[in-house]
């Protein structure tokens, strides 16, 4: 369950901070990739170097340190984990998180995350029993965060009662339960295509388009975060692809066709976001075409329509098929026609003539066209559209065919 998962651990300033080192070791042993952030106070109890040695990664300690921000940035730290653990969690960080205060690295991360958060409080018994602490914990529970109650016993300060950091096994069990809940696509395989294809004219020239693969990668990332096994078949692109996503680089439409068709039997969904070339030169010159006077005439032939072929070949409702339609006018009508022609479940219609939409942009505005519904999604980051599409897929898979 933890293998290949990215867990971000926030360590705050209590004596139990030293126990976080063992937690890191156990998470790594279970196959997780762990990234640690520490408050300033935590560093008085245990050195960042300990965590750096255990995780083999830099430890984040400052909110706006230029080097740290370059490497990952506090917003990425907040949003790119499968889950965040706060252990030990002091009364102070619990209060800040409950109130939305963001005045240091860890509180900023917690105020910016939409990932599952597991909070393991550790503090003096009297402090833990305070109404304010209990109210704050209740508020975090209402928000959907998981609290791992502290253990009972003799504390470092001599007091006896609740306040000792929960056992590592309890924290890891809670983490596993949260991941299972937040991963509705566990056990599912999602295939995504992204980027352009290249159709070669000769060894130095090709026909292509400006697709960067961002939309497809956003869908792939959202599917992976939801727990799916994800295969991304992509044309030539220059994006950082998380290690949790299996990649299959291809160049031509024919290569993409073979890579997709050989997998569709074993996947639950196909998101065909690649900007596939519709035409390819009838013949490819084995040597570079030298220029001469007059015109160059190239005869193009149609490429196979990958999505239409998969739509035609599927029996029943599986795999679920989603195509894209990049248009400059009549988006809904064209998307509807493609929905029927390609026999798919949804077409993501995209008016590429609008500002901030289409090839190479970080944002997009689309309209989701299904047989019985048309859902416009206003201009927003492609990552948000990716999450929306995966929420749609989860609902679709939940309905019996
Ligand atoms: N597609 C495909 N194989 C192709 C071409 C496109 O699978 N050879 C997929 C795209 O990945 C996308 C959808 O089909 O999901 C786009 O539909 P299409 O009708 O090909 O769009 P256009 O190329 O824009 O076609 P037209 O010029 O007819 O509008």
Image (cartoon, helix red, strand yellow):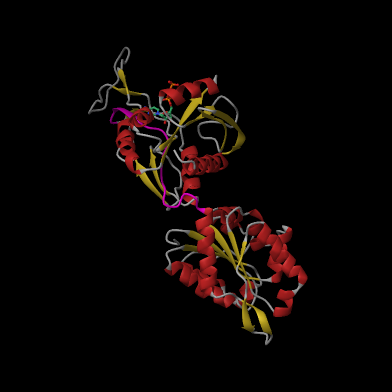
| Res 81 visible | no
Quadrant of the rendered image holding ligand 1: top left
Q: To which quarter of the image does residue 160 belong? A: bottom right
| Quadrant of the image containing the C terminus | top left
- Figure check: 94 above or below 276: below
Q: Is residue 27 above or below residue 112?
A: below
Name the residue: 65% across, 73% down. Answer: 13
Furthest residue toward right: 131
Q: Quadrant of residue 130?
A: bottom right
Q: Residue at the location (47% across, 30% down)?
A: 324
The question of residue 95 being in magenta is answered with: no
Residue 323 seen in the current view: yes
List x then y, in percent, for residue 176: 50, 63
**Magenta segment boundaries in residue numbering:** 183-203
Q: Position of residue 62 (x, y in %)?
A: 63, 63
Q: Position of residue 8 (x, y in %)?
A: 54, 62
């Amino acid at each position: 369950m933890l293998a290949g998962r990215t867990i971000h651990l926030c360590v705050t300033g209590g004596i139990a901070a030293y126990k976080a080192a063992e937690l890191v070791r156990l998470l790594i042993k279970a196959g997780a990739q762990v990234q640690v952030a520490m408050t300033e106070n935590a560093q008085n109890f245990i050195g960042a170097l300990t965590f750096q040695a255990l995780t083999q990664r830099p430890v984040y300690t400052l909110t706006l340190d230029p080097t740290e921000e370059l490497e990952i940035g506090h917003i990425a730290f907040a949003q790119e984990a499968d889950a965040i653990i706060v252990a030990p969690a002091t009364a102070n960080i619990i209060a800040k998180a409950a109130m939305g205060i963001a005045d240091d690295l860890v509180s900023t991360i917690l105020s910016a995350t939409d990932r599952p958060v597991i909070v393991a409080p550790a503090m003096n018994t009297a402090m833990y029993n305070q109404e304010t602490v209990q109210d704050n914990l209740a508020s975090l529970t209402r928000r959907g965060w998981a609290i791992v109650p502290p253990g009972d016993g003799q504390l470092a300060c001599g007091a006896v009662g609740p306040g000792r950091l929960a056992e590592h096994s309890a924290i890891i069990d809670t983490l596993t339960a949260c991941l299972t809940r937040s991963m509705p696509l566990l056990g599912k395989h999602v295939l995504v295509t992204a980027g352009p294809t290249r159709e070669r004219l000769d060894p130095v020239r090709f026909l292509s388009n400006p697709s960067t693969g961002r939309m497809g990668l956003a869908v792939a990332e959202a599917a992976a975060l939801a727990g799916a096994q994800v295969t991304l078949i992509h044309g030539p692109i220059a994006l950082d692809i998380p290690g949790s996503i299996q990649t299959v680089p291809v160049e031509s439409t024919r290569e993409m066709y073979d890579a997709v068709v050989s997998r569709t039997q074993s996947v639950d969904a196909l998101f065909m976001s690649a900007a596939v070339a519709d035409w390819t030169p009838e013949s490819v010159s084995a040597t570079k075409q030298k220029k001469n006077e007059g015109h160059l005439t190239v005869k193009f032939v149609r490429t196979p329509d990958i999505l239409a072929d998969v739509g035609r070949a599927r029996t029943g409702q599986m795999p679920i098929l989603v195509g894209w339609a990049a248009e400059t006018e009549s988006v809904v009508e064209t998307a509807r026609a493609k929905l029927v022609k390609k026999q798919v479940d949804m077409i993501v219609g995209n008016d590429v003539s609008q500002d901030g939409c289409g090839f190479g942009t970080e944002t997009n505005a689309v309209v989701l066209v299904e047989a019985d519904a048309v859902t416009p999604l206003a201009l927003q980051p492609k990552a948000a559209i990716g999450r929306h599409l995966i929420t749609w897929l989860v609902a679709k898979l939940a309905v019996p065919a």
